[in-house]
Structure formats: structure tokens, C-alpha cells
Image (cartoon, rainbow, N blue to C red):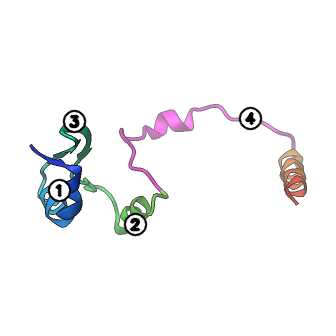
Amino acid sequence: MRSVNIAELKNQLSKYVTFAKDGEEIIIRDRNLPVAKLVPFSADNLTDEEALLVAAGIMRIPETPIDLDTLFKIPTGKMSSGEGTKALLADRDEGL
């Protein structure tokens, strides 16, 4: 594992990003004290669209796989017919 002080990292960022692309982890130091880690980005199961969303900061990669059976068993609230629409419209009116 490599380590680098911030000043050198700023001067040679492309070099250290290349190391990370090749699978290395780089410890970033501030006055020789470790403060951060630069790690390779793993996008094994992501589509190109998902990778763009991650890069834009719109989406995060889940740390663990989603269990759909458990997700769909989460109880949801129940409303009588039309109550949800009324609540939505009221909320929109408050925002104007």
C-alpha cells in the first residue's frame, strides 16, 4: 500500500489516480499523519447509466444487496379513496 503527503498528491494527482485505477489503495497523509484513503472504484454490477449517476453524486452504491422479499413485506399505511390525493394537493398549495 502506498502513502503520500497532500503536497505531493496535489502535484502528481494523475499518477496516484492511475495507481488507484490499477487496484492500489493510497493512504493520504497531512504532515505525515494519515487522514484519508484513496481506493479503487468498484463498479462491477453497475450499468453505464448507474455509473454516471454515482459520478454525479445522485446515487450511491448499496453496501449490501437489497433483499426484495424483506422490502416488499414492510407494512405501508392505508388511506381511504381520495385522501392521498387531497393530502398531496394540500401540500402543493402550502408550497406556493
Quadrant of the image for the N terminus? Answer: top left
Mark 3, residue position: 33
Q: Describe residue 1's horizontal placement relative to residue 76 as left or right.
A: left
Amino acid at pointer 4? Gly
Disc with the residue nearer the chain's start (3 vs 1): 1
Q: Residue at x 22, y 55 (%)?
A: 7
Q: Position of residue 94 (x, y in %)?
A: 89, 53
Mark 1, residue position: 8
Q: Residue at x 82, y 39 (%)?
A: 79
33 or 83, which is in the foreground? 33
- Circles 1 and 2, Cβ within 8 Å, touching? The answer is no
Q: Position of residue 6 (x, y in %)?
A: 23, 51
Disc with the residue nearer the chain's start (1 vs 2): 1
Disc with the residue nearer the chain's start (3 vs 4): 3
Amino acid at pointer 3? Leu
The stretch in magenta equals 59-81
